Amino acid sequence: MRLQNQRIEFCDFLRAVSVTIVVFAHYIVGFSTLSNFLYNPNNVKDFYSFLWLVDWVDGAYGVAIFFLISGFLIPISLKKYGTFKFLVARFFRLVPTYSLCLICVILVSLIFGTLEYSHAIIINYLANITLFRDIIGGTIIDSVIWTLEMEAKFYFYLALVYFITKGRLVYCVLISLIFLLIPLLLSVNSIPNKYMAIFSYMFIGVSIHLICFEKKKQIIFFGFSLL
């Protein structure tokens, strides 16, 4: 138990690192590039010397860390609650807060004129709060939510495979590896393949969890992690 708590605390530290990277990338690199404030890659004279780090900082690094952490921690919740209770717990953890935040985004967008009111807003809102908007149809309201949508799909996918395999995480990873490799080997560009490519980061986290806590087939899962 002590080892597990230490690892969770370490995950909290990694979350802090990833949050810093994402915030830095969005509000310093992204915003400043658009507004020509502080960081302007087209005008080196306006580029402050102490901001040289922004030239390589990419928010994708922070997102990848988040996905890895999710893959590492989700098996703990699945083992603790089981498939159904896990999905219910995740629903009430994500959807209510997300629904309220999305209403705030819509209201602010309407106030500042970046969004015009129409009945389509309500339809898109309902589609967005499902977190399966890109599958059921609808326009994304807040573009940064794509990561949360991916997380929700991964929760559902892993819980489903966990239920089918009767809690054998080893088979969860191996089945997912097959789903990932076949489209890549056949050069098939499909929506499921897009999901699996992103899910691969999370399954690296699942693999690390298995290596650390279950000591199963370490060489195989280490090889998958390298993939």
Image (cartoon, rainbow, N blue to C red):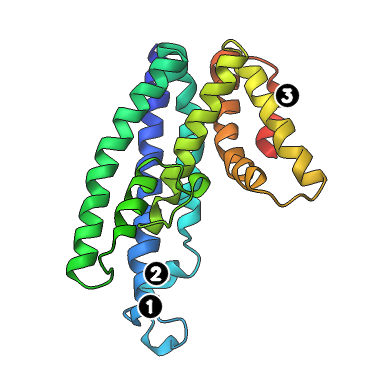
Q: Nearer the viewer, residue 200 or 153?
A: 153
Q: Are marks 1 and 2 in contact (CB under 8 Å)?
A: yes
Q: Residue at x 56, y 18 (%)?
A: 162
Label 3, residues with CA under 10 Å away: few <14, some 14-19, many ≥20: few
Q: For residue 4, say whether it is visible.
A: no
The residue tagged with tag 1: helix, strand or loop? helix
Mark before the other along the chain sequence, 3 or 2: 2
Instruction: Quickly name the residue at label 1.
Output: 34
Task: In the rendered view, tell whether residue 125 sits above or below residue 7.
Answer: below
Instruction: Quickly name the residue at label 3.
Output: 219
Q: For residue 18, say whether it is visible.
A: yes
In the rendered image, residue 98, in percent from the top left (x then y), is placed at: 29, 43
Task: In the rendered view, tell whether residue 114 sits above or below residue 70.
Answer: below
In the rendered image, residue 148, in percent from the top left (x then y), is placed at: 41, 44
The residue tagged with tag 3: helix, strand or loop? helix
Q: Nearer the viewer, residue 156 or 36?
A: 156
In the rendered image, residue 94, in percent from the top left (x then y), is placed at: 32, 35
Q: Are marks 3 and 2 in contact (CB under 8 Å)?
A: no
Question: What amino acid type is highlighted by mark number 3?
Answer: Ile
Instruction: Quickly name the residue at label 2.
Output: 30
CA gap, disc 3 to disc 2? 40 Å
Question: What amino acid type is highlighted by mark number 2?
Answer: Gly
Label 1, residues with CA under 10 Å away: few <14, some 14-19, many ≥20: few
